Image: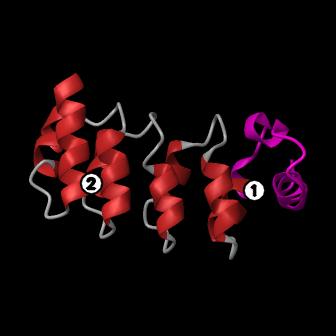
Amino acid sequence: MQFKELVALITSGSSTAWRTADICDEVWREICRSDDADIRKACVMHKRVPSWVLEELIGDPAETVRFFVAMKRSLTNRQIERLAADVEPSVRTRIALNRSTPHTILLKLAQDPDDEVREAANARMAVG
């Protein structure tokens, strides 16, 4: 699938077929470089988004993109650590709620200066 085709599918809103479409590395690179944060955010929801794309989008300037990355269960521990140190409390809260977040990182987030982050981390630790 080409970048323009993918964008057309995403923006049409009429299909979610793009979430399982075969996307080559060249198109993934175009997505990461896109000026449209909504396209970058939407592509995080692809069922087979490569780890290297998530790694790149962890440093995205748009908080919403990083928030959506923090929802992925396929994150590596290194990626989780980076998101747990994000400047935005919403991203840290989201990573605290991620089932893949290790207990050691939850312990750190339970000491976060933001109330919501602390509450999310403590709630996750309470349920295991």
All told, the count of numbered labels is 2
Which residue sits at x=75%, y=34%? 20
Query: Where in the figure is residue 27, as x and y percent of width and height?
Result: 75, 56
Mark 1, residues whose alpha carbon is within 10 Å: few (<14), some, or many (≥20)? some
Q: Please tell me the numbered disc located at residue 84.
A: 2
Q: Nearer the viewer, mark 1 or mark 2?
A: 2
Residue 16 forms part of the magenta stretch: yes
Question: Is residue 82 shown above or below 119?
Answer: below
Please provide the residue range marked out in magenta.
1-26
First along the sequence among labels 1 and 2: 1
Which residue sits at x=24%, y=54%? 117
Q: Secondary structure at mark 2?
A: helix
Question: Is residue 32 shown above or below 50?
Answer: below
Q: Secondary structure at mark 1?
A: helix
Which residue sits at x=43%, y=66%? 59
Q: Please tell me the numbered disc located at residue 27.
A: 1
Query: Viewer-proximal residue, 86 or 26?
Result: 86
Mark 2, residues whose alpha carbon is within 10 Å: few (<14), some, or many (≥20)? many
Taking the image as shown, residue 87 lies to the left or right of residue 45, namely left
Query: Where in the figure is residue 123, as x and y percent of width and height?
Result: 22, 36
Taking the image as shown, residue 128 lies to the left or right of residue 76, namely left
Q: Amino acid at mark 1?
A: Val
Q: Amino acid at mark 2?
A: Ala
Quadrant hosting residue 41: bottom right
| Residue at the extreme top | 128
Query: Where in the figure is residue 7, as x and y percent of width and height?
Result: 83, 59
- Per the model, the C-alpha gap separating discs 1 and 2 is 28 Å
Quadrant hosting residue 46: top right
Question: Is residue 29 shown above or below 18?
Answer: below
Query: Viewer-proximal residue, 57 or 10?
Result: 10
Taking the image as shown, residue 53 lies to the left or right of residue 94, namely right
Q: Can residue 128 be seen from the camera position used here?
A: no
